[in-house]
Image: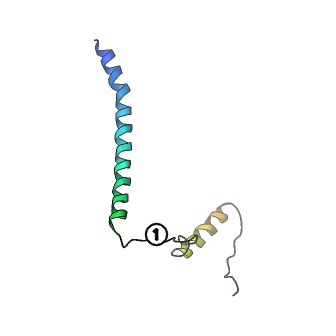
Amino acid sequence: MTVCVMIGRQDGSAPERWVRRALLAVAHSLLTVVCHLLSDRTWSYRELGEKYFDRPDAEYAKTSLVRRLTRLGYDVTVKPKAA
C-alpha cells in the first residue's frame, strides 16, 4: 500500500471513531442519570411549572426585554400591573 492510500483510510475512519466516542459518552451520561434516579426510592418527579425560569430573575428579564426593545427603536415604559 502506498502512503496516500493509508492516509486516506485514516482520514475516513477518524471522524467515525470520534462520532462513536461522542455518542458513547452521551449514552454513558444518560445511563448514569437513570441509574441514580432509579436507585433513590425517595425521589419523586415534580413539575416546576411554566414560570419557573421567570420567577428568580424577574428583574433581569424585565431589564433585558426593555433593552432589546430599546435597541429596536421603541420607547419603553414599564409599570407594575394594578392588583
The answer to which image quadrant residue 54 occupies is bottom right
Q: Position of residue 31 (x, y in %)?
A: 36, 53
Q: Position of residue 21 (x, y in %)?
A: 34, 40
Q: Position of residue 39 (x, y in %)?
A: 32, 64
| Residue at the disc numbered 1 | 45
**Residue in front for this viewpoint, 52 or 46:** 46
Residue 18 in the figure: left or right of residue 80: left
**Above or below 13: residue 24:** below
Q: Position of residue 60 (x, y in %)?
A: 54, 72
| Residue type highlighted by circle 1 | Tyr
Residue name at image x 33 percent, y 15 percent: 5
Q: Secondary structure at mark 1?
A: loop
**Residue in front for this viewpoint, 65 or 57:** 57
**Residue in front for this viewpoint, 8 or 13:** 13
Residue name at image x 68 percent, y 80 percent: 79
The answer to which image quadrant residue 22 occupies is top left
**In the rendered image, which quarter contains the N terminus?**
top left
